[in-house]
Amino acid sequence: MRDFVMNKDNQVEEKKIKMKKFGVGFGKPDKRSNQGNCKDLFSSGSKEEDFVTKKERENLQKKNDAVQMSDEEFLLEDYESDEEGAGGTSKRKAGKGPHIPSSDEEEEEDQSDEEDDEEKLKVYFCSRTHSQLSQFIKELRKTVFANEVKIVCLGSRKNFCINEGVLKLGNSTRINDRCLELQKNKKNEVSKIKNLDTGGRIRRTKASSGCPMLRKSKLQRQFRSEVSQQGALDIEDLVSIGRKMGTCPYYGSRSMLPAADLVVLPYQSLLSKSSRESLGLKLKNNIVIIDEAHNLADSLISMYDSKVTLMQLENVHFHVGRYFERFRNLLGPGNRRYIQTLMVVSRAFLQILHENPSYADLSQDTEKTYRANGSSDSSLAINDFLFSLNIDNINLVKLLQYIKESNIMHKVSGYGDKMASLQNCSTKHDTLECNEGSILPDFRALSVILQSLTNNDGDGRIILSRSQTTCSRQGGYIKYVMLSGEKIFSEIVNQAHAVLLAGGTLQPIEETRERLFPWLPTNQLQFFSCSHIVPPESILPVAVSCGPSGQSFDFSYSSRSSLIMIQELGLMLCNLVTVVPEGIVVFFSSFDYEGQVYDAWKASGILDRIMKKKCVFREPRKTTDVESVLKEYKETIDALSVEESKGNPASQSGAILLAVVGGKISEGINLSDGMGRCIVMVGLPYPNPSDIELIERVKHIEGLGNSNSITPKFSVTNEAYNGDVEVGFDILRSCRRRGKEYYENLCMKAVNQSIGRAIRHVNDYAAILLVDARYGSDPSNRNFSNTTNKLPQWIKERLVSSTQSYGEVHRLLHQFFKFNKKRRECQ
């Protein structure tokens, strides 16, 4: 083997000498040496004339000049892997090209003058959305703390950016990439971008030196001074100040981090390790408060999910292949080997996603693994996935190190953008428009899924989908689903002085403990709960078991589509609109079911009967349209209430809003006062058991704490599950405790979040109707435990769990609203 390697090295050296003689090298070509070689070549005598004809020399010279002029910037610097580099470490040969960070890496500001602030105690407050953070800042201003502590609010570039040229990109990933690219341009002082002019000649133009919002450091200092004087500010306030001063609020707020006492930031920035490191967050001996923590475990692990689509893989494979063909003879052996490895991996992914593989023949083992059940969806462990594709012998850690250190993503993307611009972009198009087809997001998606494949085998599962969508070109996908959050959360707990989980629907806490900190001694876990501030007479929760005609309500998966059930629900609402003042919000389990019910009511005439008393609004699927619908809903209620107060009662009184559990309205929206006088929860919104990711989580949670086996024994094997509803139900029935508890908790936490939209202040009042026989006090018909036990304590204590008929419910509602109307008039 040594002799073979030595002979091969000799052949490589001979080939290098021969290729250098003709101006083509294995590494990045040196301009001067190439020119010298070309001069020697063209001044040589008849010996070389026999070797190379004059025409061939001219073509070679043109090719060499073309590389130097147009493509040299896309050529990778020589890369040595740990076999080649000294000391067994990978390295990139020193060169003039800078490393461009990925979207989740950040260019750190120089904070040496503020290092003394790093040791001070900090409180990190995080919540799920920017709107929830704004609500927190709004409430904070009402307290004495607003003027006693230094507060800084952090957020994403998309929410902070005031550079219109970057904002118009729309997509968060592209905004991040463009922002970092501008910072790179700032470091390079002047970036030269090549465009093609109308005559076909290459024209060099100067790009802007960095982002115009960061050119003047004096404005950044003024921004910090202005914000410090104004106290507690949310993202909208910071953006407004940044626009007024013409300086970047994103980097301005980040620069205030060391001096802050209270840091307000979204989940992603605190819970993701890479985000913490890029922002420079120091959790050691500091306090962490996590708000809206009812779904913390699922939110945490979802940050470590990754996904690459068929279209993204095809895009990356094509561009890497084209790049390799163009620069094959100019790349060093390290670059060539890793690029070929990258192509092998992308080809393996592609062949498994194509129903009729055209890239290569599937191995018999792979065919058996993925097509045994005739399914287009399946789930596997990481090792099974790698072995099935015959790529288990590839060192993914080294491949990822190469992708990070070599700058291959930006080189391939830049070359692809240039080729696209030659074909499509005229001189009138700016660089941003030309870069719309950039493969950077696709390349990054592949890189992230490769990173996921380096996790422990039991930490997650690979979901493979070959479903060919008709409305999108994306087709199938490969997705890694993280299942274990224990190790991720332990890093936060071990560093912080204290961690507080806060929320209105945290119970039951046992599931969260088992999933995130099972190793924590019970004496280190404190639980505190308090009752609601509203008096008992301000809330009327009722379990409604049957409708006006006596039909028992059963909105289980098998019965909810029954026309009888839908009609009975409609009749109940026809009665409700006559007794409930102002606004009624009805929550359905999904958008599809809401649409099915709405269409049935419209066809039967029930919708017309409802609309005679109240205007009907529907939650839109697009979250961007929710705000306008809510505004119109509120204005309608307010306008009709004003008319009624003037003694001019209209035929209509208020409005009704059809919403969806898990939609935007069900979480984080305040439906106070007239917007939510009555909340109707239709059925128990259990998640769909055909969701393959959900079932994988259920199986993982069922196996927690099992010392004899990581995976519990189910009546249905892992390989057989392919998203079938009945198989999903079989798996749920096979669960003994934890998996079943988790499935029910998902449902009840969604219920608690939805009904919690009403009763938003001490003088508010509302009725809550839980419409399904399973909410009743008799648990004999239930497959799971008593659902009402998992309602919030302040609702459970006042719940009317058993009623003889709907007439009794109607009478209770009439008395409740009559009493609270009088009480309100007396206040």
Image: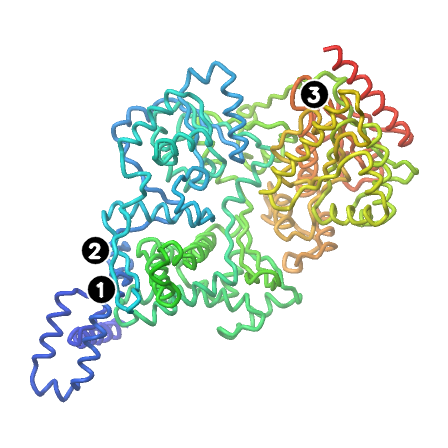
Q: Which is nearer the N-term, disc 2 or disc 1?
A: 1
Horizontal side of residue 329 vs 238, given as left or right: left
Residue 31 is situated, as x and y percent measured from the top left of the image, at 16, 65
Whether pointer 2 and pointer 1 mark residues with C-beta atoms closer than 8 Å, the reply is yes
Q: Which is nearer the N-term, disc 3 or disc 1?
A: 1
User: Residue 319, labelled with which disc?
Assistant: none
The residue to which callout 2 is attached is: 95
Quarter-wise, where is residue 544 in the image?
Answer: top right
Q: Amino acid at mark 3?
A: Asp
Q: CA distance from mark 3 to mark 2?
A: 67 Å
The residue to which callout 3 is attached is: 764
Q: Which is nearer the N-term, disc 3 or disc 2?
A: 2
The residue to which callout 1 is attached is: 28
The residue shown at (90%, 36%) is: 548
Count all numbered tags in the image, as a single digit. Answer: 3
Of 542 and 723, the residue lying toward us: 542
Select label 3 or label 2 by which is in front: 3
Quarter-wise, where is residue 223 in the image?
Answer: top left
Horizontal side of residue 326 vs 579, given as left or right: left
Whether pointer 3 and pointer 2 mark residues with C-beta atoms closer than 8 Å, the reply is no
Q: Amino acid at mark 2?
A: Gly
Q: CA distance from mark 2 to mark 1?
A: 10 Å
Q: Secondary structure at mark 1?
A: loop
Q: CA distance from mark 3 to mark 1?
A: 72 Å
Select label 3 or label 1 by which is in front: 3
The crowding category of the residue bearing disc 1, from other C-alpha atoms within 10 Å (few below 14, some 14 to 19, many at least 20), is some
The crowding category of the residue bearing disc 2, from other C-alpha atoms within 10 Å (few below 14, some 14 to 19, many at least 20), is few
The residue shown at (24%, 54%) is: 97
Residue 601 is situated, as x and y percent measured from the top left of the image, at 82, 46
| Residue ranking furthest to the top | 826
Q: Amino acid at mark 1?
A: Lys
